Image (cartoon, grey):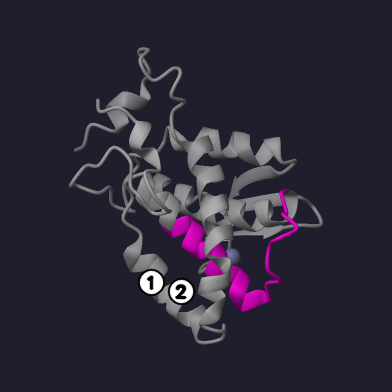
Amino acid sequence: MPKTERRHPRGPAQPVEMDPSMWEVAGDDLAPALPRLVDLASEIGCTVQFEKLECLTDGYYRHDARRIAIHGGLSVNAQVATLVHELGHALLRAEPDAKDPELERAAEELVVESVAYTVCGALGLDTAGYSIPYLATWAQAAQIETIERTAGLIDRLARRIEDAALPQKDTEAGPREEKDAQTGP
Ligand SMILES: [Zn+2]
C-alpha cells in the first residue's frame, strides 16, 4: 500500500490511494468509512439514523434535533456519499469559523455538495453522475462568485471529513481490515 503522506499535496480534491478504477456508487466498497463518519457525527453532538425515507429523499440533517437521517435502502457507497453531504451541513454549524461567508440556501447546498464530491473523490468514489447535476441545479440559484468565496470553507470541511473517514496514519501499518477495501476490485 502506498504511503499516505501525499494526502493533501496542494489544495482540495486530491484523491488519495490513487486507483485508476474508481468505486461505483452502487457498490459497498466504502463500508469501513461508514462507522468512522458516524463517529465524526457523534463527536460534534449529532446522531445518525439509518431508516426508510420517502422516495427521492436520500438523507437530511435536522439542526434543531442534531440529527442526520440516511435512507437505509441506499447502497453502502451511496450511504457514505449522503452521510458526507449531511455532515457538511452539520459541520457548518457545529464548527463555524469567524471568516466563514454568509450562505443562503442555494449557496450552502453548493458548498456541501462540493465538500461531498471532494471527500468522495478522496475515498475513491465516483459521484460525478450525482454531484454534477445536483450542483448545476443549485448553481442556477447561487451567484457564481459563491464558489470563489467559499473555496476555503469547502477545503476546510472536506479535510475535516476526509481525516475522519480515512484510516488513521498511525495504525495504517497494522493489520487493518480496511486495507482490503482499498486494493481495488
Ligand atoms: Zn443538502
Question: Residue visible at 79% across and 52% down?
Answer: 65
Say above or below: 98 vs 15.
below
Badge 2 is on which residue?
135
Question: Residue visible at 76% across and 50% down?
Answer: 66
Residue type marked 1: Ile
Q: Is residue 119 left or right of residue 138?
A: left
Badge 1 is on which residue?
132
Q: Quadrant of the C terminus?
A: top left
- Please provide percent x and percent y for residue 75: 40, 49
Answer yes or no: do the residues labelled 1 and 2 have beta carbons within 8 Å? yes
Q: Is residue 174 left or right of residue 113?
A: left
- Please provide percent x and percent y for residue 138: 52, 79
Say above or below: 134 vs 78.
below
Q: Secondary structure at mark 2?
A: helix
What's drawn in magenta, residue-wise?
95-117
Say above or below: 112 vs 35.
below
Few, some or many residues within 10 Å of mark 1 (<14, 14–19, 20+)? few
Few, some or many residues within 10 Å of mark 2 (<14, 14–19, 20+)? many
- Please provide percent x and percent y for residue 183: 23, 31
User: Is 65 or 149 nearer to us in this picture?
Assistant: 149
Question: Residue visible at 59% across and 59% down?
Answer: 153
